[in-house]
């Protein structure tokens, strides 16, 4: 069964390998040079001063570095939030919808392999490959973005960290799997992934994330600059820095764990529904015999 699942989905696995290879080329060509320049110029400490806006020389140096190296990573962050949705369309939607659309489920369910083993093997193989690829991809992105995105709570760094990014990828794939079971058409299931994924992701990212923990309040610009300001900062002429609610930088991994737990919880629910729908279907009946009678029903153990 593992070999069959691998053969059926080798196109999706090849696509993941090509994506990782492309990222590797970017890391070797652009990322290594960028990190080398960042360390050689000693911009780590200068970046911290830049956030507080207290040293014009550091501000000029950091801005010159960003002008040279930040463009390509920033372009990536503009479309990367949609990558988990694409994974759901290309890997999740065909996983079971193709079996129903082409009728191959009838052959699978009349073999010696039980429906439970057939379904479990397909899910484990595909989800396992997707998980490994997404973790490797997120780790590479996190390393690449580090010099140009020192604030950890920015969307570019938070959304593509090694916990949350794989969580969103698995969520997208689970949406595709369930849509494939419900609609039994690959294109329809792939289309359904888009609105469902956005309907789940947007409230989590923009509604729940800022409220995972009660924000702190401070009027210290240096402390706020290193964290995640929740309120907009407005200052009039001659006014001091106003009190601002913010999430401190040391809550980054707490927020990562909280959001990943939410994503995995939704993923498990979606896959459980798909599992129940598949195993609840009636087993196919055997075709009529040549002598006019009918062969006994094939019994398939779930």
Image (cartoon, helix red, strand yellow):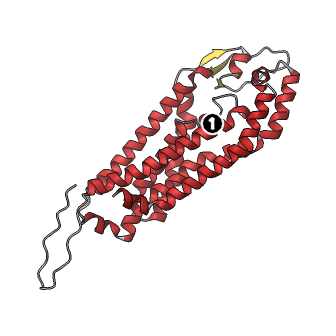
Q: Is residue 278 left or right of residue 263?
A: left
- Specify few, some or many for label 1: CA neighbours under 10 Å numbering under 14, 14-19, or 20 or more: some
Is any atom of residue 242 visible in this view?
no
Q: Is residue 223 left or right of residue 167?
A: right
Where does the image place residue 52, in percent across and percent down from the top left? 77, 20
Q: Foreground: 154 or 35?
A: 35
Where does the image place residue 149, in percent across and percent down from the top left? 70, 32
Residue at (15%, 69%) from the top-left corner? 297
User: In the rendered picture of this protein, how many numbered marks are placed on residues?
Assistant: 1
Residue at (37%, 48%) from the top-left corner? 271
Image quadrant where one finds the C terminus: bottom left
Q: Foreground: 201 or 294?
A: 294
Where does the image place residue 137, in percent across and percent down from the top left? 58, 44
Image quadrant where one finds the N terminus: bottom left
Residue at (39%, 47%) from the top-left corner? 270
Residue at (85%, 19%) from the top-left corner? 55
In the displayed orientation, state which residue is furthest to the bottom: 291
Q: Foreground: 241 or 136?
A: 136
Which secondary structure lies at badge 1?
A: helix
Please tell me whether residue 241 is drawn above or below residue 285 in the rendered image: above
Query: Dot 1 corresponds to which residue?
Result: 142
Q: Foreground: 264 or 108?
A: 108
Q: Is residue 105 left or right of residue 137?
A: left
Is any atom of residue 87 visible in this view?
yes
Please tell me whether residue 284 is drawn above or below residue 219 in the rendered image: below
Where does the image place residue 171, in percent across and percent down from the top left? 47, 45
Q: Quadrant of residue 15?
A: bottom right
């Amino acid at each position: 069964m593992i070999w069959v699942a691998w053969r059926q989905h080798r196109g999706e696995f090849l696509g993941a390998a090509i994506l990782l290879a492309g990222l590797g080329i970017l890391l070797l060509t652009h990322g290594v040079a960028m990190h080398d320049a960042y360390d050689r110029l000693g911009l780590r400490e200068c970046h911290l001063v830049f956030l507080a806006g207290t040293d014009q020389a550091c501000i000029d140096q950091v801005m010159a570095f960003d002008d040279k190296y930040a463009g390509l990573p920033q372009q990536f962050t503009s479309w990367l939030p949609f990558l988990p949705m694409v994974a759901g369309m290309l890997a999740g939607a065909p996983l079971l919808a193709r079996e129903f659309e082409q009728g191959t489920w009838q052959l699978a369910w009349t073999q010696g392999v039980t429906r439970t083993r057939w379904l479990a093997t397909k899910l484990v193989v595909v989800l396992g490959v997707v998980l490994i690829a997404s973790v490797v991809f997120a780790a590479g992105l996190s390393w690449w973005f580090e010099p140009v995105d020192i604030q950890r709570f920015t969307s570019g760094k938070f959304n593509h960290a090694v916990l949350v990014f794989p969580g969103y990828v698995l969520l997208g794939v689970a949406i595709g799997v369930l849509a494939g079971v419900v609609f039994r058409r690959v294109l329809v299931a792939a289309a359904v992934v888009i609105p469902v994924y956005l309907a789940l992701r947007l409230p989590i990212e923009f509604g729940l994330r800022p409220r995972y923990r009660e924000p702190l309040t401070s009027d210290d610009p240096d402390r706020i600059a290193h964290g995640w300001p929740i309120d907009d900062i407005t200052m009039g002429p001659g006014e001091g820095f106003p009190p601002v609610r913010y999430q401190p930088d040391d809550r980054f991994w707490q927020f990562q764990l909280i959001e990943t737990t939410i994503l995995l919880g939704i993923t498990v629910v979606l896959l459980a529904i798909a599992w129940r729908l598949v195993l609840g279907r009636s087993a196919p009946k055997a075709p009529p015999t040549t002598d006019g009678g009918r062969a006994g029903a094939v019994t398939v153990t779930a």
